Image (cartoon, rainbow, N blue to C red):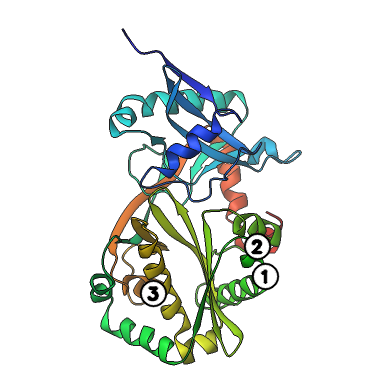
């Protein structure tokens, strides 16, 4: 008897099954909320009343007047299926269905963000991205051997300097929110001085409060003499934990190597939690030493992870509206000014 296949819009009833499937995948969506929200948009594939796959993102730009151009769906992962076989069978069918629905609803484009970690879709515009990933489930000695000697010295320096590592979840994270925002802003300003095109947009306190309360979020805080010197925010999804965001006090970090010490402590902590993969977050694609973000690349590489390239990009639903939207999104100074409102 042939299976009955349905492709359905995501609903509050279906969402828990999709969320559970994502948590069992390798490359999950790190920004997926625990419970259904009205801003979620996407479709799922159901076989004989069992959810076997789907692609869920977030509607952005759905504001009065401007939404004629700006209404788009942003995805933080590739489509997720219960098995590779199901993905091969139904991914194209799912995308075709979603594109037709998006056209009816006046959506400009689908945009896969830099959190995607697969290479299975055909995009209308494509960009190569990269990260470093460390396979966990190993002994501390095995992980430590892969760290570059210079970085091992920095970690030892942080330990000998008495840097305190505080691991926070839920409400305990929120007490450090102001320090987190301060150090992120300081790090952004330092990055922009080196590279005018740097685009680490700040987010509102409300955004991070919601994120901190997510059960899959962990905040690592490094303190020196009761001063918060560095912060690192990690988000687990599926079998992978992602280094989502962080920041440091430039002078304190230079003196005590806080960032290196805290990042090593985070890798070690998640290894003990049984997580499968530690993902360093985005890095430039094989940059030269003259690249303004080469320091970020070298820092993350030094912890011994495997270099991994992947594609992100756009699936264009309405071409002329997408061109106008690209112009709007290219205004980085304007985006920085309003980023805390997003």
Crowd band around label 2 with a 10 angstrom C-alpha radius: few (<14), some (14–19), many (20+) = few
Residue 131 percent across, percent down from the top left: 36, 60
* Residue at point 35%, 47% (across, down): 26
Residue 62 picture quarter: top right
Image mark for residue 171: 2
* Residue at point 32%, 28% (across, down): 86
Instruction: Identify the secondary structure beneath mark 3.
Output: helix
The total number of labels drawn is 3
* Disc 1 + disc 2, Cβ < 8 Å: yes
Q: CA distance from mark 3 to mark 1?
A: 23 Å
Would you name the residue on which mark 1 appears?
Answer: 175
Instruction: Identify the secondary structure beneath mark 2.
Output: helix
Q: CA distance from mark 1 to mark 2?
A: 7 Å
Crowd band around label 3 with a 10 angstrom C-alpha radius: few (<14), some (14–19), many (20+) = some
Tell me if 123 is positioned left or right of 66 in this view.
left
Tell me if 116 is positioned left or right of 102 in this view.
left
Residue 270 percent across, percent down from the top left: 40, 63
Would you name the residue on which mark 3 appears?
Answer: 264
* Disc 3 + disc 2, Cβ < 8 Å: no
Residue 146 percent across, percent down from the top left: 24, 73
User: In this orientation, does residue 178 appear?
Assistant: yes
User: In this orientation, does residue 292 appear?
Assistant: no
Q: CA distance from mark 3 to mark 2?
A: 24 Å
* Disc 3 + disc 1, Cβ < 8 Å: no
* Residue at point 60%, 43% (across, down): 324
Query: Which quadrant would the N terminus be assigned to in this image?
Result: top left
Crowd band around label 1 with a 10 angstrom C-alpha radius: few (<14), some (14–19), many (20+) = few
The residue most toward the top is 1
102 or 184, which is in the foreground? 184
Instruction: Identify the secondary structure beneath mark 1.
Output: loop
68 or 8, which is in the foreground? 8
């Amino acid at each position: 008897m042939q299976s009955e296949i349905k492709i359905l819009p995501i609903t509050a009833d279906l969402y828990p099954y999709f969320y559970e499937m994502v948590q069992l995948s390798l490359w999950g969506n790190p920004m997926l909320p625990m419970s259904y929200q009205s801003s979620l948009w996407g479709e799922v594939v159901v076989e004989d009343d069992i959810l076997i796959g789907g692609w869920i993102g977030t509607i952005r730009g759905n504001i009065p007047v401007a939404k004629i151009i700006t209404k788009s769906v942003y995805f933080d992962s590739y489509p997720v299926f219960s098995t590779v076989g199901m993905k091969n069978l139904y991914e194209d069918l799912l995308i075709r269905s979603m594109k037709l629905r998006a056209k009816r609803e006046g959506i400009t484009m689908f945009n896969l963000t830099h959190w995607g970690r697969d290479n299975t879709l055909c995009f209308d515009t494509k960009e190569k991205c990269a990260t470093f990933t460390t396979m966990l489930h190993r002994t501390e000695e095995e992980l430590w051997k892969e760290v570059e000697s210079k970085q091992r010295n920095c970690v030892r320096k942080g330990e000998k300097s008495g840097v305190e590592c505080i691991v926070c979840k839920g409400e305990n994270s929120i007490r450090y929110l102001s320090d987190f925002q301060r150090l992120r802003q300081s790090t952004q300003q330092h990055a922009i001085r080196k590279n005018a095109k740097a685009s680490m947009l700040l987010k509102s306190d409300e955004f991070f409060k919601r994120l901190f309360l997510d059960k899959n979020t962990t905040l690592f805080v490094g303190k020196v003499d009761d001063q918060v010197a560095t912060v690192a925010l990690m988000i687990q999804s599926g079998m992978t934990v992602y280094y989502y965001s962080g920041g440091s006090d430039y002078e304190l970090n230079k003196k005590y190597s806080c960032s290196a010490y805290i990042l090593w402590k985070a890798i070690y902590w998640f290894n003990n939690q049984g997580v499968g993969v530690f993902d360093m977050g985005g890095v430039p694609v094989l940059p030269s030493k003259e690249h303004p973000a080469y320091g970020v690349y070298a820092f993350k590489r030094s912890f011994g992870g495997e270099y991994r390239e992947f594609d992100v990009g756009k699936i264009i639903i309405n071409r002329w509206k997408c061109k106008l939207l690209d112009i709007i999104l290219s205004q980085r100074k304007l985006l920085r000014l309003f980023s805390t409102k997003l």
